Image (cartoon, helix red, strand yellow):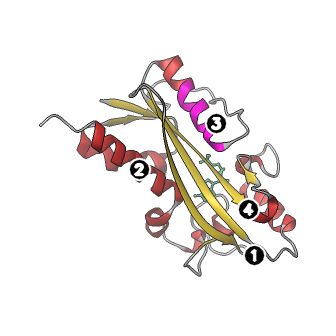
Amino acid sequence: MTICFASNNAHKLEEVRNKVAPLGINISSLADIGCAEELPETQDNIPGNSLQKAMYVLSKYNIPCFADDTGLEVQALNGDPGVYSARYAGPQRNSTDNINLLLKNLQGVSNRAARFRTVITLVGLTKRPVVFEGIVDGEIGSSLKGTSGFGYDPVFIPNGHHRTFAEMTMNEKNQLSHRAIAVSQLIAFLTENFKPAA
Ligand code: IMP
């Protein structure tokens, strides 16, 4: 069985491919199915964008598909940047600009609570879309720390840790990340419902 993961991100694809290989499931990227266009992401919430991307691939390419969408939700900013995390400081999607704007908006704010939220929506294998969600609670540091990872990693300190995601190895972060939680739910669902023939 082949399922498309609506992504061209090599790290995300590798992580999922390794986990579903024992199930006999092949994962195609967007490039693998010949999808070169940018997927629509016009919803105003994370689950909406995840569903929109997955449905786009299913209806245009007629292949079962799952899509992920992630956002950083900061309590004191009423959940911003949320669904707009990638474009917080503008359409250039620049992580340094995004972090600088976030720190500016949190200047003098003592409530630094935040969470990363990933939603994965799977369509085309079951009658209705199936939704998986991974959340990691944490707080926003006062300055950038660490150089690994991407996006908001240098300012996000997960609860129970003293280091930012960017100060952790990729392996460490992958054990506890929001995406890892959502992916493990997806894998559990596929394992339970689409066991390879004995
Ligand atoms: P996407 O839905 O995975 O493309 O994520 C949207 C945006 O959220 C990214 O452009 C990043 O700014 C941010 N983001 C997503 N995942 C992470 C993460 O694991 N660490 C830091 N930032 C992230």
Q: Residue at x 83, y 61 (%)?
A: 101
The verdict on label 4 being within 8 Å of ligand 1 is no
Which amino acid does the dot numbered 4 rest on?
Val
Q: Disc 4 designates what residue?
A: 74
Gap between marks 2 and 4 measured at Cα: 24 Å
**Location of residue 92 by image quarter:** top right
Sequence-earlier tag: 3 or 4 = 3
Above or below 32: residue 155 = below
Q: Are marks 3 and 4 in contact (CB under 8 Å)?
A: no
Gap between marks 1 and 2 measured at Cα: 33 Å
Which amino acid does the dot numbered 3 rest on?
Gly
Q: Residue at x 58, y 69 (%)?
A: 165
Sequence-earlier tag: 4 or 1 = 4
Q: Secondary structure at mark 2?
A: helix
Please give left or right for residue 189 compared with residue 134 in the image. left
Above or below 58: residue 78 = below
Q: Nearer the viewer, residue 130 or 166?
A: 130
Gap between marks 1 and 3 measured at Cα: 32 Å
Question: Which quadrant, please, contains the N terminus?
Answer: top left
Above or below 189: residue 110 = below
On residue 185, which mark appears?
2
Task: State which mark lies toward you, 4 or 1.
Answer: 4
Q: Secondary structure at mark 3?
A: helix
Q: Disc 1 designates what residue?
A: 143
Sequence-earlier tag: 3 or 2 = 3
Task: State which mark lies toward you, 1 or 2.
Answer: 2
Label 1 crowding class (10 Å Cα cut-off): few <14, some 14-19, many 20+?
A: few
Q: Are marks 1 and 3 in contact (CB under 8 Å)?
A: no
Q: Residue furthest left?
A: 198
